[in-house]
Image (cartoon, rainbow, N blue to C red):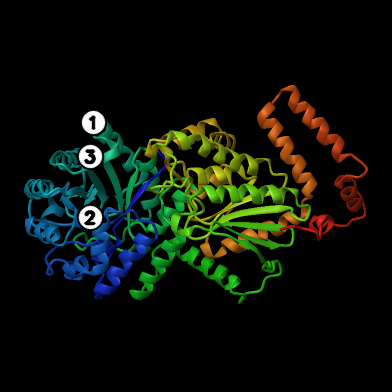
Amino acid sequence: MNPSVRIVEVGPRDGLQNISQNVSTAIKVELIQRLVDAGLRTVELTSVVSPKAVPQLKDCREVLQSPEIRRLLQGNAQRLPVLVPNIKGLNIASQCGVSEIAVFISATEGFSKANIRCTVDEGIARSREVVQLALERGMSVRGYVSCIFADPFDGPTPCEAVATATEHLLGMGCYEVSLGDTLGVGSPQSVRTLITFLKERGIPLDRLAGHFHDTYGQALANVWEAYCGGIRVFDSSVSGLGGCPFAPGAKGNLATEDLVYMLDQAGVSTGVNLAKLVATGTWISDKLSCKTQSRAGAALAIKYAASMKRAGGQVETTKSIPRMKWTRIRETDGLILDRSGANLRVTMNRPKNGNALTTAMMEDLVSTINEAGKDASINRIAITGNGKFFCTGMDLGKGSTAVGKESASLLQYERLTRLFDTIDSCPKTTIACLNGPAFGGGVGLAFACDLRLCAKNARMTLSEAKLGLCPATISKFVIRELGVAFAREAMLTARSISPTELKQRGIIADVAEDPQEFTSLVEAFLTSLRSISTDASRMCKSLVQAGWMYGGQGEQVDVMKQMFLEMMSPTSAGTFGVQEFQAGRKVDWDKYSTNPTSKL
């Protein structure tokens, strides 16, 4: 079962269309930009409809022709559908450079006549005409079915009517059909019944989406039921904006913030930055002079605001940890080294190239880790990245990659394995501090480290298979950290794995919910490790490595005995630690082991 979900953000269209006050074109354009920046891969831009029918969207051409939206349309990085009711709307959208449209029909007669002033059959015929022309022009088409559970005029909707409408849209050529609970009257039981009916009818669930309004507070429950039933695409609206102007009593859409929060907590990947999404919901609510309809959004906005105040020193707490003072030790084209007490921070410094691993950077990393491993004044090594990415793996740039060059392949293999093995065997505690996404070898670098901390947007992706490659040099670390089954799934699907899922599986130690909290999280974590003996850490690492390499064999027993005798030695750190424990004193192991003759 694919654990990832694609969210279709309908706020700029479905969310705004029922707002009575005028929303300027500039605000609509900025809303779209903010949603895209938050990681939404599909954003419905607007609807090309009659200004008399939907006055709020009368500026649809201005929105589509704005420089910002034109750049998005030309970029092809997101799906950006536009709802069109007829050929005229299609032509306008086409002229504005739109490559994807959406058409809609109702499963029921009453709503069809109120919404588009025609019967269901007439609506199907109109949509077929639009879809056919759009496909001829090379456009993609998404379909909507309204009133899947009830019609405000006709009452309950038979499952047969929904299935028939869905089959018509798929048969026309729609790549996906969104099933809309226009009145928000559905419940998990009605969702289960409908999905079962459609599945038995032979309608493929991977071509369906759920669009649940929250009139009776059932939208999230309905999404989860649909997800468990096999649906993997859901429509939602930032801040819970929306409501159909032709369905009396229908409230807003499911809030995107609530949806992302629920899925994040369940370990389901969405690709959305929740902190940025919450900020967007707060922003648009302020612009509309209304309160957000998202419960998660409202709660997280307060939490994030409090975190920002703490980060800015405006709020004092009894447990606050002073910021570390870092001293710059060395800076090269690929690395920056900083020291703070017994902590060494290694920052990969090729932000324009996603901190991809060049030959020089790998050699510098190996040298640095080896030197730090021998330095008695260093207890911990934190590895992080500069810019948006932690590390994107091997350098695949033109003229620099070893792919396809037999003479260079073996050298590249040796460089990569030397790097990862050096980190893995380092006697110091190594912490991968993922400031942003990691791909391929960047994931291996993180998994070669002992511990991991992540920013909220720091997804891990074993992307090699998409390029015809495989994670050969990092596979032993990936399998060790993820386990065989999860590693297999991650490699074969090349899917993005969220920090939330990784934390739930115990693979990362902690996640900074707000990007601005990440540095504080790292420093607080490093400070907490001062209570851990560096000698004890080294021995623990040896025990873990022996268990991984020799589990149940004689070699593991040998290491166990060696570590036991070492810790019981009269001159060991353990002897000192037990004495301090008996005296009722806590040990700051950084002070115990500091050596002023450090080279780093």
Taking depth in this image into account, of 571 and 115 the one nearest to the observer is 571
Q: Is residue 97 above or below residue 566?
A: below
Taking depth in this image into account, of 146 and 536 the one nearest to the observer is 536
Q: Tell me what residue is drawn at x 16 percent, y 54 percent.
A: 111
Q: N-terminal of the two: label 3 or label 2?
A: 2
Q: CA distance from mark 2 to mark 1?
A: 27 Å
The kind of secondary structure element at disc 1 is loop
Taking depth in this image into account, of 201 and 69 the one nearest to the observer is 69
Question: Which amino acid does the dot numbered 1 rest on?
Answer: Gly
- Count residues near mark 3 (Cα–Cα under 10 Å), then give few for <14, some for 14-19, many for 20+: some
How many numbered badges does the structure rendering display?
3
Q: Is residue 149 visible?
A: no
Q: Tell me what residue is drawn at x 25 percent, y 56 percent.
A: 80
Which residue position is annotated with label 1? 202
Measured from the top left, where is residue 365 in percent x and y?
A: 60, 50
Question: Which amino acid does the dot numbered 2 rest on?
Answer: Pro
Q: Are marks 3 and 1 in contact (CB under 8 Å)?
A: no
Question: Which amino acid does the dot numbered 3 rest on?
Answer: Cys
Q: Quadrant of the C terminus?
A: bottom right
The kind of secondary structure element at disc 2 is loop
The disc label shown at residue 81, or none: 2
Measured from the top left, where is residue 184 in percent x and y?
A: 30, 54
Q: Nearer the viewer, mark 3 or mark 2?
A: 2
The disc label shown at residue 353, or none: none
- Count residues near mark 1 (Cα–Cα under 10 Å), then give few for <14, some for 14-19, many for 20+: few
